[in-house]
């Protein structure tokens, strides 16, 4: 493989990895902070994609406008889902293992509800649209404009989230809860509000990712689960509870998938992804970018 081709494949992987990172960051806010294993996370990506598709095809609104609209819309949706579905489970306590098991069962029910809702509203047919698909040259390499836009927005949003977590009082409270839920509750932090905030932010990021996904790929009501699996792989690579780790893990996975597709074919790309996951679990169970385990006991009371 010559250097130019290697750089082209790597750049294509980075473009894909930016989306992976944004999906994983949203799930990491929920799982890393609350120990809620939301396997319906990809369904929020799917809904965000369909909402953007509808706004573009029915009203002529730019998908970039759709990205902006997803933030408040899916934040409120996530906050409502937390209050209706997960708040009671969090208040029951029972330890992280019990919470993960209960939230997993609830999430599967939510997954099928959202997937069937999409089937009723949009039908089973493959849908899609073309937007900014003409290539542009970057350092002598051609890339579709929509992929560059998607990468730029994914990196921008992840950077803004990192700034929020590290430079605001509310973000500091979330990080404190992530470090020690019992200590956070002891000093008077409002766990119910913080849990609702983190779940709402996670869903908002999923909806925004869906808007970006709709610009690049075809849509069906069943696209959600593969994105959830990808997010879990990225979280394991980057470390549970680490937003920066999710960013790096997403970019790494995107590049490895791009290289794997070129070297061994698209049919074995998924096998390569899971082989990487198994290797990390065996030799770096805390993640590639962390040196210690994520604190246990993050369920906390409501």
Image (cartoon, grey):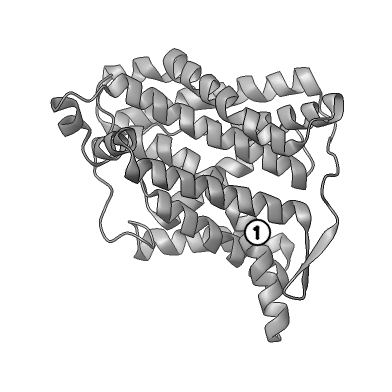
Q: In the rendered view, tell whether residue 137 sits above or below residue 34.
A: below
Judge by depth and name the residue closer to the eye, 172 or 31.
172
Q: Does residue 246 appear to the left or right of 266 in the view shown?
A: left
- Which residue appears farthest toward the bottom when viewing the image? 2
Q: How many labels sit on residues?
A: 1
Q: Does residue 45 appear to the left or right of 187 in the view shown?
A: right
Q: Where does the image place residue 204, in percent across and percent down from the top left?
A: 54, 31
The residue singled out by tag 1 in the image is: 15
Write the residue at 76% across / 17% down: 120
Judge by depth and name the residue closer to the eye, 55 or 88.
55
Q: Where does the image place residue 89, in percent across and percent down from the top left?
A: 35, 19
Split into 4 quadrants, where in the image is the N terminus?
Answer: bottom right
Q: Where does the image place residue 131, in percent across and percent down from the top left?
A: 83, 45
Query: Dot 1: what SS?
Result: helix
Q: In which quarter of the image is residue 98?
A: top left
Judge by depth and name the residue closer to the eye, 86 or 170.
170
Q: Does residue 123 appear to the left or right of 285 in the view shown?
A: right
Q: Is residue 223 visible to us here?
A: no
Q: Is residue 227 visible to us here?
A: yes
Q: In which quarter of the image is residue 43?
A: top right
Q: In the rendered view, tell whether residue 29 sits above or below residue 106.
A: below
Judge by depth and name the residue closer to the eye, 199 or 280.
199
- Residue count near mark 1 (Cα–Cα under 10 Å), binned few <14, some 14–19, many ≥20: many
Write the residue at 33% across / 45% down: 166
Split into 4 quadrants, where in the image is the C terminus?
Answer: top left
Q: Where does the image place residue 51, in percent across and percent down from the top left?
A: 72, 27
Q: In the rendered view, tell whether residue 106 sits above or below residue 27.
A: above
Write the residue at 25% across / 29% down: 95
Q: Does residue 74 appear to the left or right of 117 in the view shown?
A: left
């Amino acid at each position: 493989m010559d250097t130019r081709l290697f750089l082209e494949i790597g750049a294509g992987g980075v473009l894909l990895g930016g989306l992976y990172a944004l999906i994983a960051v949203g799930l990491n806010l929920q799982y890393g902070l609350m120990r809620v294993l939301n396997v319906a996370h990809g369904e929020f990506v799917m809904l965000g994609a369909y909402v953007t598709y509808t706004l573009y095809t029915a009203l002529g609104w730019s998908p970039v406008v759709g990205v902006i609209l997803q933030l408040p819309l899916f934040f409120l949706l996530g906050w409502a889902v937390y209050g209706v579905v997960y708040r009671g489970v969090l208040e029951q306590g029972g330890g992280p293992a019990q919470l993960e098991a209960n939230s997993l069962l609830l999430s599967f029910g939510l997954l099928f509800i959202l997937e069937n809702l999409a089937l009723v509203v949009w039908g089973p047919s493959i849908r899609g649209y073309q937007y900014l698909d003409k290539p542009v040259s970057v350092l002598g390499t051609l890339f579709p404009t929509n992929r560059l836009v998607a990468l730029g927005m994914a990196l921008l949003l992840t950077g803004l989230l990192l700034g929020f977590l590290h430079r605001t009082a509310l973000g500091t409270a979330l990080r404190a809860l992530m470090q020690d839920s019992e200590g956070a509750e002891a000093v008077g932090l409002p766990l119910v509000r913080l849990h609702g905030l983190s779940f709402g932010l996670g869903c908002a990021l999923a909806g925004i990712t869906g808007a970006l996904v709709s610009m690049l790929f075809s849509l069906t009501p069943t696209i959600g689960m593969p994105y959830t699996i990808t997010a879990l792989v990225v979280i394991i690579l980057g470390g549970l509870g680490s937003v920066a780790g999710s960013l790096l893990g997403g970019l790494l996975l995107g590049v490895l998938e791009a290289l794997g597709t070129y070297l061994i074919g698209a049919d074995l790309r998924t096998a390569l992804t899971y082989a990487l996951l198994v290797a990390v679990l065996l030799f770096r169970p805390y993640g590639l970018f962390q040196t210690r385990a994520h604190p246990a006991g993050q369920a906390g009371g409501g």
